[in-house]
Image: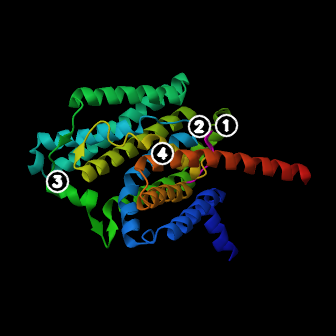
Amino acid sequence: MTSVAARIKDLFGPEIAGPGFAFLAVMLFFGIASPQFLSAATFGSVAFQLPELGLLTLAMLLPVLTGGLNLAITFTANIAGLTVAWVLQANGGVDAGLASFALGCILAIAVGATTGVVMGLVIAYTRAHPILVSLSMMIFVRGLGEFLTRGGDVSGFPAFLQPIGHGSILGIPIPLLIFIACVLIWHVLLTRMKLGFNTYMIGSNIEAARYSGVNTRKVIVLVYTLSGAMCSVAGIIMLARFNSVRVGHGESYLLITVLACFLGGVNPFGGFGRVIPVFVALVVLQLLSSGLNLMGANQHLATAVWGILLIAVMILRWLAAQLMIFNRRKG
């Protein structure tokens, strides 16, 4: 029993408490408020809507763990999607083959990784603040995409892309399977690999990590490179989901990814946080949105509730920290 409990603690960590409680609260409230909430249709809708936001949240997670931020995630995803679209259109559009799609995906991931490399190099070697660097990259990528597309959509893709965005395997949406695979990769990276350990060290204290022999510049570049590559995966999924690509697709996801990280127990200053609690937090946010929709609430209200939820999380964290300090002094 002790071994099983230790493994569960190792997998989820204490960070699961917040999103776990939020999950139970949302399920209980909307389950009572709306009879349709606890239905296959609701969970099917969540399963299809979750992956694109989830992949972008994974892209945000690594920089946040180092004490940084990647504000360019949505536009990096869109420029990667545009890369796939241009390759397909150059090879026949709707008549393009699987080889063209594979080439487009490889180039898209290379484009996303390149944006990450540039940000990582600038942050690591100039020590410029990640917010300023990623904001500059966001403006550049957005402007470049709007220049190349003239602000319009790019569409007209082969029929075989439709199952990637809307198909299922054994009743599980293909985008969700891709997202779960990426969650597992991130979990292994952060808990079983040297890069993950060094990422936490940098987020906790970059100077201490440097004096401990960690090549902090290399780690930061790798972190932002992986973040950019994950953005590309999100961009490919968005292309298949919407059957079109536009520079502004998913622009509203940016701040929600930050909310999902914080709700999932990630320290905003870096150094602490796990992937699985963030996954649970994403499910909570999607269930909250679906519940409000079932109750006839406007989608803008869901966005407002997400903002209030972030404020509530910060207040609860402060109260928990104060309680811990009080207990230590009392003890």
Q: How is the protein colored in the picture?
A: rainbow
Mark 3 — residue? 98
Circle 1: element type:
loop
Q: Mark 4 touching mark 2, by CB under 8 A?
A: no
Q: Quadrant of the C terminus?
A: bottom right
Amino acid found under the numbered disc labelled 4: Ile
Q: CA distance from mark 2 to mark 1?
A: 9 Å
Mark 1 crowdedness (10 Å alpha carbons): few <14, some 14-19, many ≥20: some
Front disc: 2 or 1: 2
Q: Position of residue 42 (x, y in %)?
A: 40, 66
Q: Mark 1 touching mark 3, by CB under 8 A?
A: no
Front disc: 4 or 2: 4
Name the residue rendered at 38%, 26% in the picture.
139
Q: Is residue 272 visible?
A: no
Q: Position of residue 167 (x, y in %)?
A: 26, 63
Q: Position of residue 225 (x, y in %)?
A: 43, 39
Mark 4 — residue? 256
Mark 3 crowdedness (10 Å alpha carbons): few <14, some 14-19, many ≥20: few
Residue range (magenta): 267-274
Residue 200 is left or right of residue 71, and the answer is right
Mark 4 crowdedness (10 Å alpha carbons): few <14, some 14-19, many ≥20: many
Mark 1 — residue? 205
Q: CA distance from mark 3 to mark 2?
A: 40 Å
Mark 2 — residue? 67
* Sequence-first disc among 4 and 3: 3
Amino acid found under the numbered disc labelled 1: Asn
